[in-house]
Image (cartoon, grey):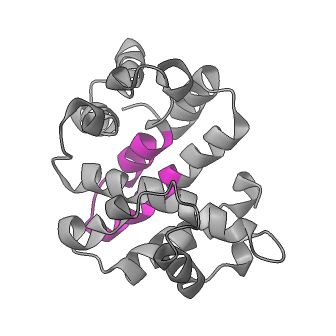
């Protein structure tokens, strides 16, 4: 299995936009926290989250291949762990008419959109920092459909059905994880 540092190097070689990189860092750290909750391989889950959008700059106009290209790059680096490869590929599965298949893949599906909602919530706080965000503030913004309208709430709320985690607890796991790397996220 590749290391987190190798995954970060791969991400940086393929993705130049700093905000997209920060999104990937967010999803990676939340995936690590979710792996801990489920007794999964924390490093593998973090790598899946870190790399899930790593090919976006190359595939944004060809979403059917989104995440497939990243899986190919991983294989070229010698990655053979099927959980990591399938986890990364699962991110683009909805564009190919497929659904996630296990806890790791559903965790990625649900937390991807939530990280964006949390960042948007931070950016409207007086200090524009994650430190000013609470679970209650995120839940208020979750209920306000016009706020961060691009954040697919229908994906986030699947945490209850597919992961067995109530929405407030899911938000808390993600928020605490992201607050732990706020410096790296720049907020």
The magenta stretch is: 27-50
Magenta stretch: residue 31 in it? Answer: yes
Q: Can residue 35 be seen in this view?
A: no
Q: Position of residue 113 (x, y in %)?
A: 46, 56
In the rendered view, would you say 63 is above or below 137? above
Of residue 39 and residue 171, the one placed in the foreground of this image is 171
The residue at 43%/64% (across/down) is 33
Residue at the outermost right position: 127
The residue at 33%/34% (across/down) is 92
Horizontal arrangement in the rendering, residue 12 relative to residue 101 (left or right): right
Question: How many numbered discs sit on the rendered protein?
Answer: 0
The residue at 58%/67% (across/down) is 147
- Residue 48 location, quadrant: top left
Q: Position of residue 140 (x, y in %)?
A: 54, 83
Split into 4 quadrants, where in the image is the N terminus?
top left
- Residue 32 location, quadrant: bottom left
In the rendered view, would you say 116 is above or below 64? below
Q: Position of residue 157 (x, y in %)?
A: 32, 69
What's the magenta bit mostly, secondary-structure-wise? helix
């Amino acid at each position: 299995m590749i290391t987190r540092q190798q995954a970060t190097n791969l991400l940086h070689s393929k993705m130049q936009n700093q905000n997209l990189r920060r999104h990937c860092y967010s999803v990676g750290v939340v995936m690590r926290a979710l792996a801990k909750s489920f007794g999964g391989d924390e490093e593998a889950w973090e790598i899946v989250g870190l790399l899930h959008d790593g090919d976006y700059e190359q595939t944004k106009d060809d979403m059917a291949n989104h995440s497939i290209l990243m899986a190919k790059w991983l294989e070229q680096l010698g990655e053979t762990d099927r959980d990591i490869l399938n986890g990364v590929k699962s991110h683009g599965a909805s564009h190919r008419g497929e659904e996630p298949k296990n806890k790791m893949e559903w965790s990625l599906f649900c937390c991807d959109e939530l990280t964006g909602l949390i960042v948007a919530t931070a950016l409207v706080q007086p200090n524009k920092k994650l430190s000013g965000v609470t679970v209650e503030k995120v839940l208020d913004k979750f209920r306000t459909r016009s706020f961060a309208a691009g954040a697919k709430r229908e994906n986030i709320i699947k945490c209850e059905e597919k992961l067995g985690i109530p929405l407030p607890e899911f938000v808390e796991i993600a928020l605490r994880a992201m607050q732990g790397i706020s410096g790296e996220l720049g907020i």
